[in-house]
Image (spheres, coloured by chain):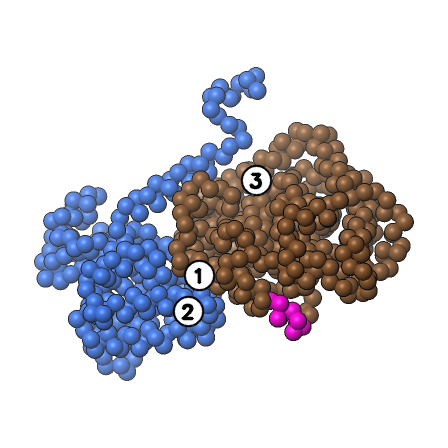
Chain colours: A blue, B brown
Amino acid sequence: MEANGEETNPGFDPNKNYDEDTLAQQREIEKEIAAAQSMVSQLYTFDEIVEEYSQEDAIYRQKVEDLKTRFKNLRKTRGDGNCFYRAFGFAYLEILLSNAKEYKRFFDVAQKSKDELIGLGFPQFTLEDFHDTFMDVVKMVEKPGTVDALLNAFNDGGLSDYFVVYLRLLVSGHLQQNADLYIYFIDGERTVKEFCSQEVEPMGKESDHIHIVSLTKALQVPICVEYMDREGDKCNSFTFNPFEGSADTTDPTPVFTLLYRPGHYDILYPL
Amino acid sequence: MATSHKPDSKGSGSSKPSSSSSPASASNLNCSSMSSKSAESASGSGTDKKKKKQSSKTAKSEGSESSFDFFDGMGGSDGAENGLVYLNAKWDPDDLSDGDMMSPPSPACVRRIKNDILAIYSDPPPGLCVMPDPHNITKIHGLLTGPFDTPYEGGFFYFLIRFPHDYPISPPRVRLMTTGNGTVRFNPNLYKSGKVCLSILGTWAGPSWSPAQTLSTVLISIQSLMNEKPYHNEPGYKHERTPGDSKNYNDIIMHETIRVAVCDMIDGAARMHMPETLRAVMESSFPDYYKYYVQVCESHLHLDGQPMNDPFGDSRPSFNFRQLMKWLKTIKARLRDNKTDDSDSDDEDGTQGQGDASSKGCRDCDQDDHGSSEEAAHVKTGAGVTAEGHSFQTSDGSEGPGGGNSNTS
């Protein structure tokens, strides 16, 4: 063995794949970082987060200043690829706490969605499992609900992840039901169903424009997203209006606003 | 449906060698190849790693020719990046080094596992049997029978499956136990280490696990790896590198299926701590497949003595179909003897001996479309027992240390 020359390091095992070890280690570290963040955080002021959000460069600092002119607070979500769904879910239910009429409408939509998804071929028992938990969390709004109770639920791994799973299935269901429309927005040679199984249904898959359009349409909830990218000196806001192009005359005023920084969504609270 | 009559009466005279000599001859097959090609076998043992490296490399840089096939149906660089991250997901159900396996499962997780099992019992996919571990609900024993019209036909592939504590958010971990003691790679995606390379398990590039998938999805996906031309499963081998490679690979797989996934499985079930119920399934399916096994051997006798040239460079023994036929005959005689010991009469469908009752319930493993009401009834009973977290024992309680001995003596 020693004659081999190369193996001077006594700890080196030629049969071991160190690439894999490094990757595994890296994954562990990422996992730890993610786990240390709360899935949905307390409220922060912009002064509290300005350092973290603008450390990369001055453009972001300027944009935080811009946000301060319109928004008061922010809630951070865990950067685990599910942030859009968690941000959407929490922000929406928090609004529903003080809007009984909208809650009633949403409750019915959510209730009905189960059979639609089963109709699309999702295994009934898995779907029911996620739907039951999803509805348990939704019902927390009427208990009467509190922000703290919602915050606890969204930071409970079991409840929070199941909630995300169901939102993902809703997105997948909506895309599949309207496959003829969405097929043109899917890159690569794949069907809508393939896209869903690759980019929507698996946990941790990040959301793109198409996911947001789909979820707002599936639940008929208009939302606004502030884009904090590197262009311009102000954040670009974009409203996702699910009623656009339809005869529906429902008020398209966004119900809540999310903040997008490349690869991540947080929740914004207006002044 | 072959009955156990004719071949037996023919072979009863020559089935002298005791069953214990059969595994020995099998290991001889291995040993000879190992010693004669020790250098190759060393490089062979590194193949798994080489392959992993290759696949992650392919995912990183798109330069190589194989990357095209590799990316087929993967859609976009996004998938490749994620694929890379998940490619090396922990896969070994026996690896208890991390919290994913050590923490106790949540009630939601246990509920889902039970539902997954019930779903298989109530709508059993063909050629697929599962049995929860009597001591641990997060551990499942699975038996896949090689699909028809593939080189895996009639083989018994035993899998160990463990659910992590956050199942179904994370996928299960799966190990193929049918590897001839870690010596046989059955498929470009089924390593001799037992690792199953499948994107939904996080061990291969492509669509990853989704919580809406189930134990049944996993097993069916594994089954689909065992296809008519497994040669092409290897990235970059969409077209044959050398004409005839694919057929040659099929010949190898057919030989190894009979040697390792049939004979060694039936003789080595106890060694692998395979649950009695699954053993009974194999033993009751064996006579039905016997004719087919013999046919395969007879039609390949011309290959005997030739080395198996594995197109992927794995070290393999030489073909020896003649020896396999002897081994099959021995097993057949032994199973028949056991059966006669257990029951007085020996008519065609056989009075149910010990263990047979349960195997009847899992008959779908034969891929026969029985669909009898008797079967359905049994499935229900079995499911009921399982839902309470107990073992899926044979109705007469034959499971136990005694059962193992009677089959190896």
> For the magenta stretch, what is the residue range?
B371-379
Residue corresponding to mark 3:
B48
Q: Give how far across and how far down residue A247 sits, in percent.
A: 28, 82
Residue corresponding to mark 1:
B111
Residue corresponding to mark 2:
A128
Q: Give how far across and how far down residue A43 sits, in percent.
A: 16, 55
Kind of residue at disc 3: Asp
- The subunit carrying tag 3 is B
Disc 2 to disc 3, C-alpha distance: 40 Å
Nearer the observer, A88 or B56? A88
Q: Could you tell me which residue is drawn at 55 percent across and 64 percent down? A: B383
Report the magenta stretch's main SS. helix
Nearest to N terminus: mark 1 or mark 3: 3
Q: Label 1: how many residues lie within 10 Å, few (<14), some (14-19) or many (20+)? A: few
Q: Is residue B374 magenta?
A: yes
Nearer the observer, B35 or B374? B374
